[in-house]
Structure formats: structure tokens, C-alpha cells
Image: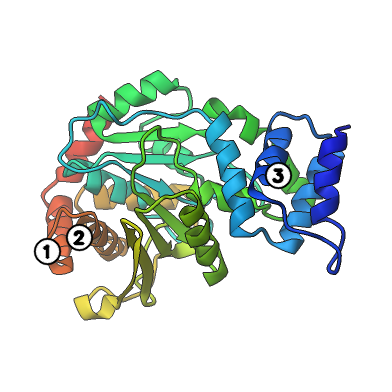
Amino acid sequence: MSDRFRELLKKVGSGTHTSKFLTREEATQATLMMLQQEATPAQIGAFMIAHRIKRPTGIELAGMLDAYHLLGKKISTAHLQSEYPSVCFGNPYDGRSRNVPVMPITALILSTVGIPIILHGGACMPTKYGFPLVEMWQQLGIDFSNMSIEEIESYLAKTGIGFIYLPQHFPEAYNLIPYREQIGKRPPFATIELMWCPVTENIPIICGFVHPPTEERIRETFALREIKNYTTVKGLEGSCDLSRNRTVIAGSSKEGKFERLIIHPRDYNLSGRDPLFDSKTQVIAEIQAVIQGKSTELTPSAILNGGFYLWHLGVSSSLNEGLSLAEELITKGKLAAKLKSLSS
């Protein structure tokens, strides 16, 4: 048992009137002790549920993210020859179970025009046990799960897409996943995963979220860590996928200046139902159909997402231009060719 960890646990788990917030340094220390298994299983589980109930502050999240950057393996983008900066997308690790995801299509669109994309995630995990990103890519013919960091860097340079897989590249964090099942709730680490950027250099980060307080904590955490270029997206199931069924709410920070982005899909004739998740087989079939240039219920979602990010990341000068380019890339077979090159 760690006596030092017990003192930190007492601070966050003493109840409504007597619990205290951790300093950034204490949050880093507590996270390192959990990741390195210096704290006992009882201590780790108690900390997770106490912090879940109390809710972490931006200062505490900054400290936890510091620990992730200290221990987690990272890739470098310095060697990439690209007209555009690399971008890291943060999606919930426990996957998708309600709507058909668009992220693989978005990644193909952006990498096709020369934007290097870094994704990260784990295997099927609690509490949702949804369809994880790494498995979507596997069923599309690309397996990131057994690549080393060096192989990921090489693949990123060759194809424009890289994927950091938690069990392979950050086992210390992956070893904490069983606690999520045991406590039955997402711990603060689920929020850290949205913000974590496993890249050596400072590159733009795009974070999905569901609840407005999460976005507030993201903004506070990034300010403390002096991360000035990021985007927040109130996306489907907390992902970076924009919804056609509601107003798009996003936030953009460029060099520390934050701007709210509000987009109405109906203004671009793209409103409608977000395709529902029925099975993994159905999801992959719908994603594959769009990649092959077929017009499906998912196509407008792919155009909306691809067009938004093409505009937001500086490829297109307007949203309308971005939407047109996304549609062209889909219908002209560019995504099919890109996917083929990824697996060759």
C-alpha cells in the first residue's frame, strides 16, 4: 500500500464538506502512481469513483495529462513533408453504439488532400463496449494494433494516417481499463483521453464532447498546459462527428483566441437523420459504400463532416467550398483509391 497515495485519496474522497482539490503536482503524482501500479487496486478504484463523484477541476486534469505525457509513448511529425499541419483527433475510447461513425471517412478525406491525421484509442472497453475505432480500421483492411511506434511513424509518413493503440503503445494506461468495468462509470481518465495528443510536437487537437461542462474543463486544462490551437466539437456520442440532426456547436482556439462556431446543416441542404447503428457489419458496409462513391444515407453525413474539417483546417476558403470538395472526393473515387493505398 502507498501511504503517499492514501493521503492524496483522502483529499479527494473525504466527502462533500471536507474533500479538497488536488494541486496540479499532486494530480500528476497520483496519476503516475496509478499508472505504475504503486497504488493498490483498492486505492485505485476508490480514487476513480471518488474523483468521478467530486468531478475533476481543470488543474487536476492538467496534472493527470502531464502524467500521460510523461509515460505514454509518442510519435514525431517533424519528418513529415506536408503542406498542412498534422491534426490529432480525440474520440471516446469506449466506441460507438448508437449512430454510424463517420471518422474513418473524415480521416480518408483529410489525408487525401494532404493533412496528416493522428488517431488514438483502445480495444472494446467499458462502460459502453461500443465499436472502437481500431476495429473499424481492421475491418477496412488496416491493422494498427501490432505496429510499433517506429512503424506507426513510417506508416504516417507514407499514408498520412497514424494510430496510437493503447494496449500496444501505452500499456500502463490500458491496465487501468478493468477498473472502469468494476466501478461501472467512466473515470476522469475518459476525459483525459479526449485531450491526450500522443505526438512529440505541438499540433492542433480536435476534442469531441457531450456535456458543456466537459468543454469548459477542456478549455481550462489546455490553457494551463499552454495549448493554444485546438477545436472542441459537440459530436455524436461525444465523438468528433458532426450531427446532421441538430445545430453544430463547436469551438475553435487559434493562438489562444477562442471563437464559437455555430452551423445549421439545413442551411446547406444537409439536415436529416443521423444513420442509426444496427450492427458492426452494417456499419462497415455503410462506410465502405460511401468510400466506393455510392450514394447512401451516410453520404450527407460524410459530406458535412469532410467539408467542415476541410474548411476549418484551412484547405478550403469557405464552408461551401469545403462541402463541394468533400463531395467531389467521394463521388470521383478518391477515397476508394486512398483506402486501397493504405492497405498496399
**Disc 2 designates what residue?**
311
- Considering depth in this image, is 216 or 184 the residue closer to the camera? 216
- Considering depth in this image, is 16 or 90 the residue closer to the camera? 16
Distance between mark 1 and mark 2 Cα atoms: 8 Å
Front position among marks 1 and 3: 3
Distance between mark 2 and mark 3 Cα atoms: 40 Å
**Disc 1 designates what residue?**
321
Q: Callout 3: 10 Å neighbours few (<14), some, many (20+)?
A: some
Secondary structure beneath disc 2? helix
Q: Residue at 70% x, 44% y: name it.
A: 26
Q: Residue at 36% x, 41% y: name it.
A: 202
Which quarter of the picture shows residue 50? bottom right
Secondary structure beneath disc 1? helix
- Considering depth in this image, is 327 or 90 the residue closer to the camera? 90
Q: In the rendered structure, which disc, 1 or 2, sits on the residue that comes first in sequence?
A: 2
- Mark 1 and mark 2 in contact? Answer it, CB < 8 Å: yes
Q: Is residue 99 toward the left or the right of residue 251 in the image?
A: right
Distance between mark 1 and mark 3 Cα atoms: 48 Å
Q: For the residue marked with disc 2, what is the amino acid?
A: Trp
Query: Residue 262's x, y, as percent?
Result: 32, 75
Q: For the residue marked with disc 1, what is the amino acid?
A: Glu
